[in-house]
Image: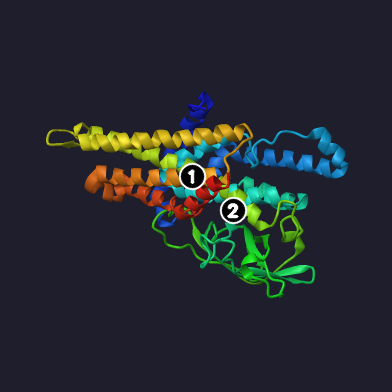
């Protein structure tokens, strides 16, 4: 893949029209917290049929699983098919990449709220849940009738997500009792459904770092489960982020994803690592949106702004900034194309490769956005011109989905393991 298809460009045009009508007029309200992102996301899903696409995809998957459960192994051999992408919108990756890029250039908080609900919440249930669990939760999440959160980060275990995890469950008969705290949880303050990772404490004095990680699904309003208020942040203001508190929350086995502690795909660590890969590829999509919008705004400004009787685009230092933005745009776009092509071919990027994409694209987007502010001068420091918002949002990508320092470790481990 070396360019966007005609269909992709048609989608882009339609998405831009939606953004001009439904997003740009509300950016200030989204940035201030006066408006949550979810009504706009639901309008987007309805207008582009994304909700119907998601519901249809889930129902087809569930129908196959019901038939598989009914007929057993013979059905699996007879109906074995190539995977269409491993998510609720499998096979529509380029459409989602266009959508994410266009939204990120205007209000990246919308993308974060939507991406965590679908790309982490729904996908984890799809990959780990039983048929009954998928029937219970998936349809409402993929249609955005309900919002999902994905809770792994804790106050003392950001980059050391598994080793430092203190949230734990203990068995109590057939149930589990959950205690602990999660922080920096996207959608946390408003989520209807929450995926929670917790250590199994068997009371045997085993090393806390090595204890098994289990994955549970909680619903808003459960006894002992408290959702904190949204944090105030430097950027991503339209994406509500908060803390979750668990005080002796009783969980039946039906809330343990897979309904067994011995999941065929490994414990919760393996589930999270798979999600990390998808999330880091998504960062490249978001970074491309930031770069494209900064690029567009800066080219227009360089043509319109005059200094000493001429357009500032005639000055060599301004041209250097524009040229560096173009290099970043080409590089990140080619990374996105590569990821889309490989996913379509059934050979998606590894965790190490996704980490490399995240590392480069997030740094490129942040550098481009800071250069955009410099190019705009005093105007760039004012909220009216929007590049300051793009810079605040871009910086979050260097921390989001694992800090860039951790990406370096994952890339190096991938290289040294060859």
Q: Nearer the viewer, mark 2 or mark 1?
A: 1
**Which residue is depicted at the point 61% across and 54% down?**
272
> Mark 1 and mark 2 in contact (Cβ < 8 Å)?
no
- Residue placed furthest toward the left: 308
Q: Classify residue 237 as left or right of residue 83.
A: left
Who is closer to the viewer here, 234 or 153?
Answer: 153
**Which residue is depicted at the point 86% across and 43% down?**
70
Q: Which mark is residue 356?
A: 1
In this view, 399 is above or below 294: below
In this view, 145 is above or below 262: above
Residue 238 in picture, x, y percent from top left = 45, 53
**Which residue is depicted at the point 46% across and 50% down?**
109
Q: Classify residue 222 as left or right of residue 380.
A: right
Label 2 vs label 1: CA separation?
30 Å
- Secondary structure under the numbered disc 2 in the rendered image: loop
**Which residue is depicted at the point 63% across and 46% down?**
142
- Secondary structure under the numbered disc 1 in the rendered image: helix
The residue beneath circle 2 is: 147
Specify the quadrant of the image occupied by residue 333.
Answer: top left
Q: Is residue 40 shown to the viewer in this render?
A: no
Q: Give the mark nearest the N terminus, 2 or 1.
A: 2
């Amino acid at each position: 893949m070396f360019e966007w298809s005609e269909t992709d460009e048609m989608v882009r045009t339609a998405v831009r029209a939606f953004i001009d009508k439904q997003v740009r007029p509300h950016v200030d309200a989204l940035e201030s917290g006066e408006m949550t992102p979810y009504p706009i996301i639901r309008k987007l899903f309805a207008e582009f049929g994304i909700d119907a696409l998601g519901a249809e995809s889930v129902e087809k998957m569930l129908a196959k699983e019901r038939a598989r459960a009914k007929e057993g192994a013979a059905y699996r051999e007879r109906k074995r098919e190539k995977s269409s992408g491993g998510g609720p919108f499998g096979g529509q990756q380029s459409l989602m990449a266009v959508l994410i890029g266009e939204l990120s250039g205007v209000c990246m908080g919308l993308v974060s709220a939507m991406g965590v609900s679908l790309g982490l919440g729904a996908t984890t249930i799809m990959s780990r849940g039983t048929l009954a669990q998928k029937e219970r939760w998936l349809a409402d999440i993929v249609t955005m009738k309900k919002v999902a959160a994905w809770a792994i980060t804790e106050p003392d275990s950001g980059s050391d997500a598994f080793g430092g995890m203190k949230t734990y469950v203990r068995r109590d008969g057939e149930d589990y009792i959950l205690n602990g705290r999660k922080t920096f949880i996207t959608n946390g303050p408003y989520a209807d459904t929450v995926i929670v990772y917790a250590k199994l404490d068997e009371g045997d004095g085993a090393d806390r770092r090595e204890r098994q990680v289990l994955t549970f699904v909680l619903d808003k309003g459960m006894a002992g489960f408290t959702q904190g208020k949204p944090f105030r942040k430097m950027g991503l203001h339209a994406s509500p982020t908060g803390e979750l508190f668990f005080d002796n929350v009783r969980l039946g086995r039906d809330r343990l994803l897979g309904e067994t502690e011995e999941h065929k795909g490994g414990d919760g660590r393996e589930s999270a690592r798979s999600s990390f890969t998808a999330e880091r590829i998504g960062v490249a999509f978001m970074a491309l949106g930031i770069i494209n919008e900064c690029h567009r705004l800066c080219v227009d400004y360089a043509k319109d702004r005059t200094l000493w009787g001429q357009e500032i685009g005639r000055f060599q230092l301004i041209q250097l900034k524009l040229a560096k933005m173009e290099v970043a745009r080409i590089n990140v776009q080619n990374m996105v194309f590569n990821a889309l092509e490989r996913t379509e071919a059934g050979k998606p990027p590894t965790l190490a490769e996704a980490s490399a994409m995240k590392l480069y694209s997030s740094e490129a987007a942040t550098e481009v956005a800071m250069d955009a502010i410099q190019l705009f001068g005093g105007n760039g420091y004012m909220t009216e011109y929007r590049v300051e918002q793009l810079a605040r949002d871009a910086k979050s990508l260097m921390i989001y989905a694992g800090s860039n320092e951790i990406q370096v470790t994952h890339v190096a481990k991938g290289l040294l393991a060859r």
